[in-house]
Image (tube, rainbow, N blue to C red):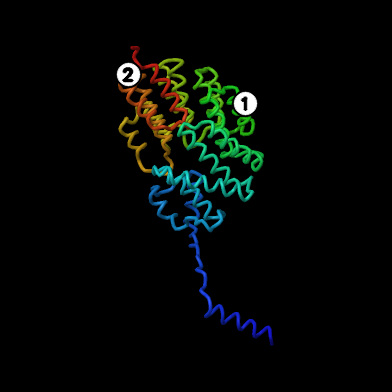
Amino acid sequence: MKRAALLCTFAIYFMYGCEAAPVVVSPQPTEQQRELVRQVLAGRPVDLSPQQLIKQLEPFKITPAQPRKGFARDAELAMAQLYEQTGQLDRTRAIYLAAIDEHRRTGSALSLPLANALYRYAEMEADAGRLQEAVTLVDESVKIHQRRDRFGNEQQLAVMNLAALLRTYLGQDQQALAIHGKAIKLHPAMSAGYAARAMTHTLNQRYEQAQVDLDSAFGFKQTPMNNEVNIFWFVQLRSQGPAIAHISLGQVVGQLYKKERAGLDAQITYYLLGEISQADLLAQANAPSIHLQRRDRCAVWFYIAMKHESENDLAKAREYYTHCIAKNTMASPYYYLAQAASIQLTPSP
C-alpha cells in the first residue's frame, strides 16, 4: 500500500510538479542516405554534387551531447571530406580534430574511423606545409591499420604510401624506401604500392629505378586507369625525351587500357596523347565532383605545364607550374615536381 502511494506521488510529481527535460530525437537515415555515406567514404561514384550531398547529410550533424558512433559518426566523416572539396577547410579541420580527440579520450585506440580521420587530417596538415605534424598523424594511422588489418587492404596501402611520401618530401629517403618496401610486401598484388615507390624514385631523379617499379605496376591492370600511366610518361620524358615518351605512352595505353576514359587520370593521359584539348581537360578538372580534391587539380596543372615544356613553350610551362604551386597542396608529389621544374626554367639573372 505504501509502495503504491509512493508511486502515485511520484507520478503526480512528474506530471505536474516538474518540467520535463527536452528529448532530442535524432532523425533516422534512409537506406539511400546510408549508401551515400558508404560511397563517399569509399570514394565510389555518386551522382550528386558535393553541395547536394552536404544538404542530404547535414540533418545528421553530431551535437556536443552525442557520442560519435554508428551512422552519425560515418556521416560526419563523410561531410568532412565534402566540406574540404567545397573549400570549407575550417569545418573539415574541426570535424577531424573532434573525432580524433573523442576517440583518444574514450580509449578507442584501434578504431578504423579514427585511423581514417588521422589520415585525412595528416593530408590537410601536409597541404599546409606542416609536414612533421603530418608524419606524426599518419604514423598513428598506420599503427591502427596494422593492428586491425593484419593482412592489409587498399586503405592501409594508401596510408602507408602517404607515410613514405611525406618522408620523401622531408628528404628522409631511406626511411621512405623502407616504408615503401613494407607496403609492397603487405600488398604485393596492388599496383598503387609500386606506383608510389616509383614516385619517390622520380622525385629523387632515379628514373631507371622508377621505371622498374612502373613495369611492376603495369603487371596489375587497374580499372579505372591509375596515375602510374602518367608518371610513366613523365619518367620517359625526363629520361628519353618527348618523342619516345609520346610513343611509349601510346603503346602502354593501347596494350593495357585500349580506349578506357573513366576518371581524371585517364583524361590527363589522353590530353598528353593529344586526343583531348587542354580546354576539355580543364573543364573536367573544374567540374564539381566529390572525387576531385585540390591535389587532383594540382596534377592537372602540372601535366599541362609539362606538356607545354615538352613542346618548348616555356612561357606557358612556367605559367602552369606557377598555378600548380599556388594550389598549396604540399601533400601532393606534383607540388614538388612543379617546384623543381619551375626552378629549372627560371632564367638566370
Question: What separation in Å lies between label 2 and label 1 (alpha carbons)?
Answer: 37 Å
Q: Which SS class for mark 2?
A: helix
Q: Residue furthest top?
A: 349
Q: Is residue 28 above or below residue 170?
A: below
Quadrant position of residue 242: top left
Residue designated by label 1:
178
Residue 214 shows in the view: no
Cβ atoms at labels 2 and 1 below 8 Å apart: no
Give the image location of residue 69, x and y in percent: 57, 54
Residue at the image point whose x is 64% and y is 82% from the top: 6
Residue designated by label 2:
314
Relative placement, left or right, of 47 versus 207 is left
Q: Nearer the viewer, residue 337 or 310?
A: 337
How would you rate the neighbour count of disc 2 (Cα within 10 Å): few for under 14, some for 14-19, many for 20 or more? some
Relative placement, left or right, of 348 versus 99 is left
Residue at the image point whose x is 52% and y is 51% from the top: 74
Tally the numbered discs.
Answer: 2
Q: Which SS class for mark 1?
A: helix
First-in-chain label (2 vs 1): 1
Q: Which of 107 and 18 is in front in this view?
A: 18
Give the image location of residue 252, x and y in percent: 47, 25
What amino acid does circle 1 point to?
Ala
Give the image location of residue 87, x and y in percent: 39, 42
